[in-house]
Image: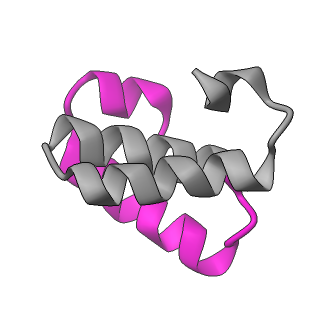
Amino acid sequence: MATVLDVLRNELEDAADSLQMAVHFRPDFAEAHNLLGACALREGRLAAAVQSLQAAVDLQPGCAIYQS
């Protein structure tokens, strides 16, 4: 599973692949949606980033991390 460090290290392709698999099998996994959004944002894929980040917020609306 991809971690925040994978995203920060710009190992985006590996991270995104792992995260896509995670949200496929666990669509309720807010952290995976959030990290997938971060990957998409770093890759310049803004629409995909917004979609993934919004999914994280929708899944855990009270989580301050996903609100920032």
Q: Is residue 47 visible?
A: yes
Find residue 32 and report its horizontal and vertical position in percent: 57, 51
- The relative height of residue 44 versus residue 16 in the rendered view (above or below) is above
Q: Quadrant of the C terminus?
A: top right
- The residue sitting at the right extreme is 62
- The residue sitting at the bottom extreme is 25
> From the viewer's perspective, is 19 left or right of 66?
left
Colouring of the image: one colour
- The relative height of residue 15 versus residue 28 in the rendered view (above or below) is above
Residue drawn at (80%, 42%), measured in percent from left and top?
61
Count of numbered tags: 0
- The relative height of residue 27 versus residue 12 in the rendered view (above or below) is below
The magenta stretch is 1-30
Based on the picture, tell me whether residue 19 belongs to the magenta stretch.
Answer: yes
> From the viewer's perspective, is 26 left or right of 16?
right
Residue drawn at (15%, 44%), measured in percent from left and top?
43
Front position in the image: 26 or 58: 58
Q: Is residue 1 visible?
A: no
> From the viewer's perspective, is 53 left or right of 17?
right
Residue drawn at (80%, 45%), measured in percent from left and top?
60
Find residue 24 and report its horizontal and vertical position in percent: 56, 78
